[in-house]
Each structure stands twice: as C-alpha cells, then as structure tokens.
Amino acid sequence: MLPSSVGVLNKVSAILAVLEKGPACLPEVVSETGLKRPTVHRLVLAMQELGLVQADEQGQFSVGARLTRLAMVAQHAMADRELRRELSTLRAVTGASVRLHQRYGDQRICVAEALRLKSAAGEGTSVGPVAIATDPVSRVFLAWRRFSRGHGTGDDALACSRIRHRGWVQGADEGGLVLAVAVCGRDGDLAAVLSLSSPSQRTRRGGSYGSEVIKGAVEAAAHISSRLSVQGATSPVKELEDRVRRVGPGSVE
C-alpha cells in the first residue's frame, strides 16, 4: 500500500498492518514497524482511547471493536451496492422496473428499486408501506404466510401451493403487468419478493412475460439471496434472512 502524504497516518497504518496479523505486544509492534518505541507507545494508547485498538491482560494489542464495526459497515455497503447493481442489470436486460420488497406485518415495503428511465403513468416509485392485497407481489407473500400458519383451504390452498412450488407468479395491477419472484432462505422461508413491472403493451403477447424474462428474474432472485447473506443492521434490507437457496422451477413455463 502506498503511503499517504500525512506522516502520522502512515504510522497508524503501519501499526494496524501489524495487528491485522493478530495480537502483538509492544516490542513486536516496534520491531515490525521500525518506529521508535515512544512513538508506538503514544500512538497505540491514543488509538486505544478511540476504540481502534484494544489491549488484553497480558499486554497484547489487537484490533479494536470500533474497527470491527467499521469493517462490518464497509462489508454491508459493498453488499448493498452489489444488490442495487443486480437490480439495475435486470432492469437493463428486461426493460422493466425492478423492485425488492420486504414484509412488515400486514404491509410490504419496497427496500430497493431500479426504475425504467421512462416510467409509465401510475408506475412510479413505491418505497412507502403498501397493504398486502391480491396483486402478484402480495400473492407471493400470502402463499408463504398462509402455508406457515396453516391457513387457506380448497382452491386458495392449492393456489398458494402452486406459487410456492413454482417460485413466481405474474399478473396485472394498476400499472400494467407484474412478475413477482420469491427470494427464499435455505430452509424455504421467504426473505423477500423480487418484482418486475411493465406496461402490458411492452411484454410478449401484451399479457405475459416471456420465458427468458422469467428465467432471468429467477436467476436474479438467487443471486440476491447471496447478497442478503451479508446484510445487517446498517442495510436497507436489515431484517431479511441471510440464508441462500435457488428460487423457482427447473424449467420456466
């Protein structure tokens, strides 16, 4: 790593480079950095006050809790960027607006989105809470919730079972045609719902998405599952499950 133009930061960086390898006592830090002992001692104590370094009872120094938290924040930020890039890529390939939804009680919230550059009227942003109803996204949420609670009988139960087995459903709503794909954890729990929405006239046959679009959405849902595995409290999808499972049927209908 190239040194900066600020000498004290270079010294702090050298100390942290030693502690990256594991706990080290003061003489070891002095030896490996080549810095003078008083300088190392002064900087280590200051770093300890800032939470960047911590010391144990044996006098060994290690990376502090604050750096651990910063590393987690950086990891979450990277995962979030990759998640949004996944949505943007799917939008570019399909030409549809792409959203990721999470359920909170009886509502769903759009936690990330990549909208078409020229969205049709009525196809605007949906970042606010929306009541779970009968649209395709809600139907996916309901399919998992009713199954887990043992709700639904007859035709309703059969419809939910089919959605769970297939992993996706499509249909119309106010803004046009919507494809909703389940994003599941390894144990089958629903973590989120990925949706594509387009004016009906833009889709194949004007009333349904083609198999290539559905396949691409199913694959994107699987990739998003892995993105969510490193999300945490600093992420806009902080409550989503962190387990991975490929979602959807073996062959797309």
Image (cartoon, grey):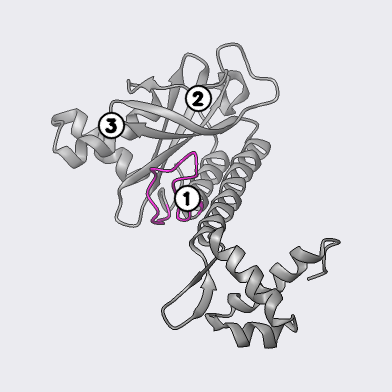
Amino acid type at image mark 1: Gln
The percent coordinates of residue 87 (x first, y second) are 59, 40
Q: Residues within 10 Å of mark 3 (few under 14, many from 20)?
A: many
Asked which secondary structure carries label 2, the reply is loop
Residue at image position (53%, 47%) is 220
Q: Which residue is mark 2?
A: 127
| Nearer-N-terminus badge (2/3) | 2
Magenta segment:
227-246
Between the residue at mark 1 and the residue at mark 3, the CA separation in whole angstroms equals 24 Å
Residue 43 drawn above or below residue 190: below
Element type at mark 1: loop
Q: Is residue 202 left or right of residue 161?
A: right
Whether 245 is among the magenta residues is: yes
Sequence-wise first label, 2 or 1: 2
2 and 1 marks in contact (CB < 8 Å): no
**Up-down: is 109 above or below 231?**
above
Secondary structure under the numbered disc 3 in the rendered image: helix
Q: Which residue is mark 1?
A: 231
Whole-number angstrom distance, CA of label 2 to CA of label 1 = 19 Å
Residue under label 3, please give it. 142
Task: Give the x, y percent position of residue 30.
Answer: 67, 84
What is the magenta segment's predominant secondary structure? Answer: loop
User: What residue is rendered at 50% in x and 43% in y?
Assistant: 235
Position of the N terminus, as image quadrant, is: bottom right
